[in-house]
Image (cartoon, rainbow, N blue to C red):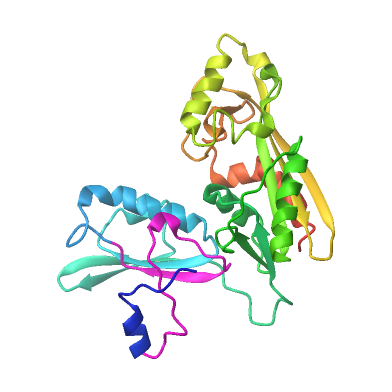
């Protein structure tokens, strides 16, 4: 965890709660926590004294995206911005009008599920998922959601590791990562290796999907390149699949791997804003849209990673 903000540290010490309250300063896009349940209380800018009104839609959309990754948390938000629910992307469970002086504001209450009563679960299992990809972690936390599981990313666990993924399959690469982190921590470790296989391109980019054209190359450029390589190829030959292999290593030495896939084909242009990576060009004929056009709930239900996580979850709970 980061050190307390200097601005608040003297105040919390004077109040005698310095051991109970932990302050951090970070962009709202990095809002996350390893604990499955919690509360967010916030009074974000609403264009009166702080922040330009033209910047508010993007700010509140960012709040909404971060809050999606804390889907068992409650959020209590006070603002005078009347489009907050629309931009956050969720209707508040409760909404009260209150006044800040003469200014009308709204007290939005987004309610998460009640935490389990103390002692109602035997022991929370700490699980480290060997990734630093926050988009991926949002999916993982939603799908593995369970009161008995505490899911940490490498960043949450304070782990910095440069692992050479030199396997020849998705399963081998996933296990290489899981074993490396397990040796460092002694905890339950999950790791995945996933990628896109395009049949016409001899299953490229395959296990090199993340490194295709270089790890620092944007997916917009990668997607454009793949579409160009398939120029003139008819629909029936544009078949492809997303593959996900997940490896689990347990403290008692047990090892387990699972594999799942999502079938589709490569589209002709990028479409959709809900996914990441190759999602905008992965067309699903059954749904008539790309995987980036699916809602998060739909995607988690049918995706390669969603299906693989459900399989591995059976080993955890």
- Horizontal placement of 9 versus 46: left or right? right
- Horizontal placement of 77 versus 125: left or right? left
Q: Is residue 26 magenta?
A: yes
Seen as rendered, the residue at the extreme top is 232
Q: Is residue 289 visible?
A: yes
Tell me where residue 142 appears, x and y as whole percent: 60, 55
Q: Residue at x 82, y 52 (%)?
A: 256
Name the main secondary structure of what is drawn in magenta.
loop
Q: Residue at x 76, y 61 (%)?
A: 316
- Decide: is 27 above or below 186: above
- Decide: is 94 above or below 237: below
- Decide: is 2 above or below 56: below
Tell me where residue 116 appears, x and y as whole percent: 63, 75
Image mark count: 0
Q: Is residue 28 magenta?
A: yes
Q: Is residue 263 visible?
A: no
Tell me where residue 117 appears, x and y as whole percent: 63, 80
Seen as rendered, the residue at the extreme left is 102
**Quadrant containing the C terminus in the rendered view:** bottom right
- Horizontal placement of 80 versus 5: left or right? left
Tell me where residue 111 appears, x and y as whole percent: 48, 67
Q: Along the line of sight, which residue is nearer the eye, 56 or 85?
A: 56
Q: Residue at x 58, y 57 (%)?
A: 160
Provide the residue span drawn in magenta: 15-44
Q: Along the line of sight, which residue is nearer the eye, 295 or 186?
A: 186
């Amino acid at each position: 965890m980061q050190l307390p903000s200097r601005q608040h540290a003297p105040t919390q010490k004077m109040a005698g709660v310095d051991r109970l309250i932990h302050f951090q300063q970070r962009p709202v896009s990095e809002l996350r926590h390893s604990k499955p349940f919690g509360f967010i209380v916030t009074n974000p800018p609403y264009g009166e004294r702080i922040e330009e009104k033209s910047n508010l839609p993007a700010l509140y959309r960012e709040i909404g995206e971060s809050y999606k990754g804390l889907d068992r948390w409650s959020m209590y938000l006070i603002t005078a911005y009347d489009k907050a629910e629309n931009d956050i992307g969720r209707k508040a469970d409760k909404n009260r009008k209150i006044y800040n002086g003469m200014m009308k504001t709204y007290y939005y209450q987004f309610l998460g599920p009640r935490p389990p009563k103390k002692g109602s679960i035997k022991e929370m299992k700490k699980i480290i998922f060997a990734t630093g990809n926050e988009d991926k972690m949002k999916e993982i936390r939603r799908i593995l959601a369970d009161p008995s599981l505490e899911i940490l990313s490498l960043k949450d666990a304070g782990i910095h590791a440069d692992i050479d993924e030199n396997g020849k399959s998705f399963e081998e690469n996933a296990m290489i990562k899981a074993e490396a982190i397990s040796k460092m921590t002694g905890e339950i470790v999950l790791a995945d290796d996933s990628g896109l296989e395009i049949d016409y391109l001899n299953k490229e980019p395959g296990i090199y999907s993340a490194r295709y054209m270089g790890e620092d190359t944007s997916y917009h450029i990668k997607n454009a390149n793949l579409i160009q390589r398939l120029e003139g190829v008819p629909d029936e030959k544009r078949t492809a699949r997303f593959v996900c292999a997940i490896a689990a290593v347990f403290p008692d030495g047990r090892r387990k791997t699972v594999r799942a896939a999502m079938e589709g084909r490569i589209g002709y242009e990028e479409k959709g804003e809900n996914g990441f990576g190759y999602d905008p060009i992965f067309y699903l004929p059954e749904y008539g849209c790309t995987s980036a056009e699916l809602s998060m709930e739909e995607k988690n239900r049918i995706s390669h990673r969603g299906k693989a996580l459900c399989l591995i979850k059976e080993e955890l709970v």
